[in-house]
Image (tube, rainbow, N blue to C red):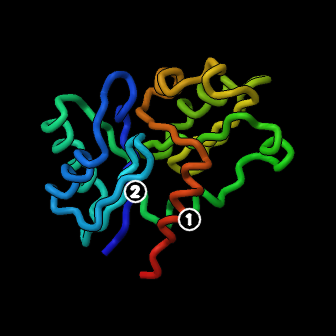
Amino acid sequence: MTRYVAFLRAINVGGHVVKMEVLRALFESMKLRKVETFIASGNVIFETSSQDVAAIREKIEKSLHKALGYEVVTFLRTDREVADIARYTPFPDSDLVSALTFCVGFLAAPPPAEAAQRVLSLKGEMNDFHFHGSELYWLGRQKQSELTFTNAVFEKAAGVRATFRGMNTIRKLAAKYPASLL
């Protein structure tokens, strides 16, 4: 069995309200095991014997679209990958101490070089960015609600879909669901 975390885009934002017990039931109806949700922002933890990440993602996206009536882009990471993301240090400690926003954006794959350059060109006094694999680390020097960088700005610049989570959420997920020893 492999434990995954599904980071769902468009859950409990923009008027798309889904109760966590409904989300759990939808995942259980897909024959996924040990389904749990973490914070009401579209983080679903589950286990499956399948190793075919693309097939799992497609199954989840199709099932959620059918049940909810709108597209829910899904980004899957194993518990080990979540632990690695939580431990990764993309910025100097001095920057992290003064940051008011520290998020990670989940992408389906590493972005093409030209897309990454367009995003990195948005760096400035208030925002800093760092790509590592299929994640974008975002450091903000103001509260997230006060910054002009958003998921929509990222997607327009990069030309790919993403969903963002606060690094505190990622670290709590990694602590609650430690990497499997399998």
Upstream in the sequence, badge 1 or badge 2?
A: 2
- Please identify the quarter of the rendering in which residue 49 is found: bottom left
Which is closer to the viewer, label 1 or label 2?
1
Q: Position of residue 34 (x, y in %)?
A: 29, 67
Residue that mark 2 sits on: 5
Identify whether 6 is placed above or below 103.
below
Task: Tell me the quadrant of the picture where the C terminus can be found.
Answer: bottom left
Give the x, y percent position of residue 68: 19, 34
Location of the N terminus by quadrant is: bottom left
Residue appearing at x 47%, y 66% in the figure? 177
- Residue 70 got which mark? none
Q: Which residue is mark 1?
A: 175
Determine the secondary structure under disc 1: helix
Residue drawn 28% across the image and 36% down it: 18
Q: Which of the pair 27/125 is nearer the observer?
A: 27
Q: Residue at x 32, y 62 (%)?
A: 46
